[in-house]
Amino acid sequence: MQKNTTQKILITGANGQLGSELADALAAKFGTDNIIITDISIPPNSVQKFKFEKLDVMDFDALVRLVKKYHISQIYHLAAILSAKGENNPKTAWKINMDGLLNVLEVARIFGLDKVFWPSSIAVFGPSSPKNLTPQHSITEPETNYGISKHAGELWCNYYFQKYGVDVRSLRYPGIIGYKSMPGGGTTDYAVEVFHKAVNNEPFICFLEKDMHLPMMFMPDAIKATLQLMDAKKENIKVRTSYNIQGMSFSPEALISEIKKYYPELLATYQPDFRQKIAESWPASIDDKVAKKEWNWKPDFTIKKMVKEMFVQLEIQKKELMKEGVL
Ligand SMILES: NC(=O)c1ccc[n+]([C@@H]2O[C@H](COP(=O)([O-])OP(=O)(O)OC[C@H]3O[C@@H](n4cnc5c(N)ncnc54)[C@H](O)[C@@H]3O)[C@@H](O)[C@H]2O)c1
């Protein structure tokens, strides 16, 4: 396949759950040499195929240096402190989430970057938002500092687009489930951990109540939505805060029941902690018809299809690790 080599892409927070998969997808589209991955921590060996630069997103001058050094035309700004981790140190989380985004938006304005991607979250909604099929335009009174930073971030994105013409695009990701990397401290992390417990024949203790329904998405759908949004014609992107998107909605109990079709011996118990309260403040499901209408968003994975694919992939990984003598 002919690669589109006109773009130079910089990813922040690239070692995380999303970045480690998005980098591969962007490399397939733009060529490995055109992807610069950055993070505050050194990447694991497996991602060393990309050029890596250590970058703290709060360091504006360092970001400017990299944009100049590599003639960057697009930034995928993923560095953030997630919902559960953010509650442990609200001020630091706010600083990283807000200063990081403002630095990226400023750099995009000053250097006239082609496009910026920045993920928001369903955490922008709060207890006063409609619980089921929460609409695109709804009450946004988040109760977590993570949600407050995402809500403020959405408004900043809209501001930079309206005032300076920065083509920044955003999705309100739901909880993302993938098999390649572990999640980084969110309220939906249980939905990844449970698969690893099942494959390793270990008991699973769920930190949410069994009937806690939340909006979720399989990683391939999250990657597909991101690429599709970034590919869409500028005039089709009418929402310049952030788009609602959803793949599926389920509770821990429903996920575990699906997993037990493959691992009937999985022992699951429930010990809700502080994350239960965060989850209770979020929607149970999301209405994403605006994204469907404006840029043809359509998820591929149902819960059944996702669980099947997760186990196919995790079993392959397990066999490879056993072959390498790691397990
Ligand atoms: N994973 C999800 O379920 C989910 C859901 C909704 C939104 N999101 C959003 O998607 C984005 C990526 O999420 P993720 O799941 O990959 O997160 P993650 O926690 O797995 O990864 C975040 C990365 O950011 C890096 N980082 C932290 N502070 C930094 C700093 N000061 N400078 C540079 N890098 C720094 C971390 O080292 C980490 O590698 C975030 O904006 C997050 O809010 C994720």
Image: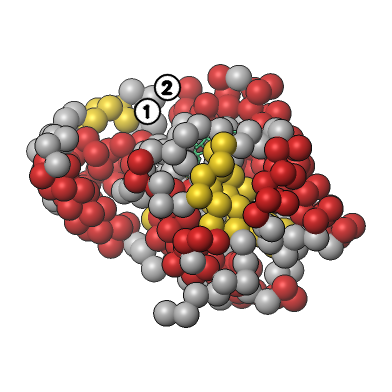
Give the quadrant of the N terminus: bottom left
Residue 59 at least partly seen: yes
Say which mark, if any, is on residue 207. 1
Where disc 1 sits, the SS reads loop
Say which mark, if any, is on residue 273. 2
Residue 204 placement, left or right of 227: left
Q: Amino acid at mark 2?
A: Asp
What's the residue at 43%, 58% (across, down)? 24
* Residue farthest toward the right in the current orientation of the protein: 163
What's the residue at 57%, 36% (across, down)? 54
- Residue neighbourhood size for the residue with mark 1, other residues' Cα within 10 Å, grouped as few (<14), some (14–19), many (≥20): some
Q: Position of residue 100 (x, y in %)?
A: 69, 38
Give the quadrant of the C terminus: top left
Q: Amino acid at mark 1?
A: Phe
Q: Position of residue 209 (x, y in %)?
A: 37, 32
In terms of image quadrants, where is residue 188? top left
Where disc 2 sits, the SS reads loop
Query: What is the spatial separation of the Cα atoms under label 1 and label 2, in whole angstroms?
Result: 6 Å
Q: Position of residue 133 (x, y in %)?
A: 55, 56
What's the residue at 16%, 48% (across, down)? 320
Closer to the camera, 148 or 52?
A: 52
Is the residue 85 above or below the residue 247 in the image? above
Say if disc 1 is inside 8 Å of ligand 1. Answer: no
Mark with earlier residue (1, 2): 1
Is the residue 72 above or below the residue 147 in the image? below
Is the residue 28 above or below the residue 58 in the image? below
Closer to the camera, 73 or 219?
A: 73
